[in-house]
Image (spheres, rainbow, N blue to C red):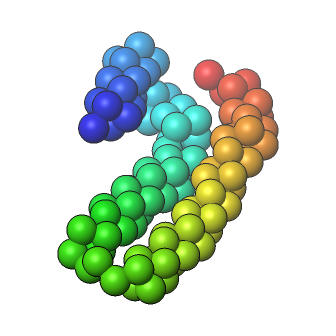
Amino acid sequence: MYRGFCLGYTIASIIITMGLGKGILFVIISLVLQNIILIPAIIAIAVSGFNLYKSIVKNKNKENIKIEVLRHTIFSLIMLLLLCLASVVEILISTNILKKIIKYF
């Protein structure tokens, strides 16, 4: 919720400062590209953690818990790769696109 509030506030501030057309273009390039990957990955990790918690509380069988922990760990590693991909998008792709488009602002 905090991330969503900060992202919304930042987007609104940029659009008000730069104007509608330039502001939306700047926001899409600088903020939205990586957050398309980042926010669903964070939500997926949270849901997976909640499901792990529910399975631990619900099932007291240690074998089922081990399987759920392994499943959550593998899923978390996959989401970690997506988070790294979002970082690469933010560092390389967004920055290079902004360098090319900033001339038009």
Q: Report the side of 36 relative to 15 (left or right).
A: right
Residue at 21% x, 75% y: name it. 58
Residue 31 in view (yes/no): yes
Locate the N terminus and report the quarter of the image it occupies: top left
Q: Position of residue 97 (x, y in %)?
A: 72, 40
Q: Position of residue 35 (x, y in %)?
A: 50, 47
Looking at the rendering, which quadrant does residue 76 occupy?
bottom right
Looking at the rendering, which quadrant does residue 19 occupy?
top left
| Up/down of 84 relative to 81, above or below | above
Residue 47 in view (yes/no): no
Q: Position of residue 6 (x, y in %)?
A: 36, 27
Residue at 69% x, 26% y: name it. 102
Of residues 40 and 18, the one nearer the viewer is: 40
Residue at 29% x, 77% y: name it. 60
Q: Position of residue 9 (x, y in %)?
A: 32, 24
| Up/down of 36 relative to 23, above or below | below
Residue at 40% x, 24% y: name it. 10
